[in-house]
Amino acid sequence: MSNILNPEEKYLTRRVLSMQESQTMRISNLANKMKAEGKDIVSLSAGEPDFPTPDNVNQAAIAAINAGFTRYTANAGIPELKKAIVAKFKRDNSLDFQENQIIVSNGGKQTLANTFLALCEEGDEVIVPAPYWVSFPEMVRLASATPVIVHTTLEHEYKMTPEQLEAAITPKTKILVLNSPSNPTGSVYSETEVRNLMKVIEGREIFVVSDEMYDMLVYGDVRPFSPARIPAMKDWVIVSNGVSKTYAMTGWRIGYLAGPKWLIDACDKIQSQTTSNANAIAQKAAVAALNGDQGIVEERRAEFEKRRDYMYEALNSIPGFKTALPMGAFYIFPDVSGVFGQTFNGVVMKDSADVAEYLLKVHFVATVPGDAFGAPENLRLSYAASIASLEEAINRIRRAFK
């Protein structure tokens, strides 16, 4: 095809051309490349815990390999894991599901992609509050639907209000996406806030995709509340979760989805024709994670809370930076518009992309520009790093914007 001008535009589909590359992966890849070149990079860009996978989980995987558990499993997940997921929902979230309402997939991304593909078609609209996780709008577009972005503010802790939700609803609205605790802001909707949002859509034929991946990483007195706990919404809420963040198992690729059986069956059908079952060994490891001693989860949550407190105080002390206090996950999302228009080391800061590039290339600190999350005035910083690494990153950021 070397003689064809712009083969991408000629042959690729609109759904692919309309998608954006994941900025979080792009920055992480660039940071890793600079590290490989010998640069002393402090990376606050990756969305994964810096802790190792718990030993009991690793041992369960080794035992599965030694037992020869290396063949195809049931497409929707092994019964042992689905039973553990049902128990987890009951124990941690006060949610009652049956095993036939659960599907295990290759990470949380696949559970969500399956859901949008099952529910959406051309002409449908999906309400996505911003700042949003980078993949939400792209998944919606991949499913031929239209993302309707609702912009929230730092003053409201980046949480959508019932009034904003009401204003965004049209006859084409098919789904509301709710991500609490949030990536990238760390915001957590309280029970009252969730109930008030659900009152807006109760009685309407609108589904709620509730991404609860960070449900065990919350701080202070805050407790996440799933909209699936509201009886009137039970048949309209689809809950996505996984073992990646809670158990430091990002590379194991195990996510799971819970919802009405008819929808889970549809996701099962899609998955059967795309990837088939999730990794057999990883499924056994996930059983050990969910059924094992949960004390390590609390230990790590407490450590994340210390890091959060440090980052909140430190970032708010840097001129031009201001941030809300994250109540969950392991991200902090400062507004850096206070440095826009200024020149540092000969570089003019026009937007957060300039800020992120300047920090990485000149001061060797990897962050992610906020435009990837629908918030061009912000940066996303992950505090899933040691206190020593965070202190070094803050020192470099201070020097960068002196």
Image (tube, helix red, strand yellow):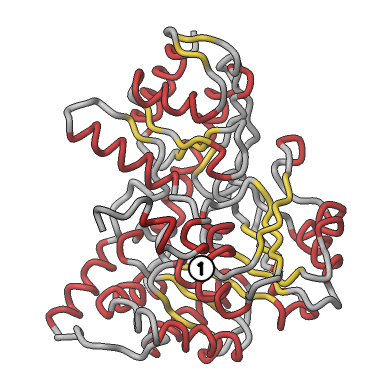
Within 10 Å of disc 1 (Cα), the crowding (few <14, some 14-19, many 20+) is many
Looking at the picture, does residue 369 appear above or below residue 211?
above
Q: Residue at x 39, y 44 (%)?
A: 46
Question: Residue 56 location in percent, x, y?
Answer: 27, 67
Q: Quadrant of residue 366?
A: top left
- Observer-nearest of 177 and 234: 177
Question: Residue 223 location in percent, x, y?
Answer: 65, 57
Q: Residue furthest front?
A: 3
Question: Residue 225 location in percent, x, y?
Answer: 68, 63
Question: Residue 325 location in percent, x, y?
Answer: 63, 36
Looking at the picture, does residue 180 appear above or below residue 293?
above
Q: Residue at x 58, y 31 (%)?
A: 334
Query: Regarding mark 1 in the picture, which secondary structure is present there?
Result: strand
Looking at the picture, does residue 242 appear above or below residue 399?
below
Q: Is residue 373 left or right of residue 208?
A: left
Q: Residue at x 83, y 69 (%)?
A: 201
Q: At label 1, which amino acid type do we have? A: Asn
Q: Residue at x 35, y 79 (%)?
A: 275
Q: Residue furthest left?
A: 66
Looking at the picture, does residue 21 appear above or below residue 37?
below
Q: Is residue 74 left or right of residue 82?
A: left
Quadrant housing the N terminus: bottom left
- Observer-nearest of 286 and 237: 237
- Observer-nearest of 238 and 91: 238
Q: Is residue 157 left or right of residue 74?
A: right
Q: What residue is shown with label 1?
A: 241
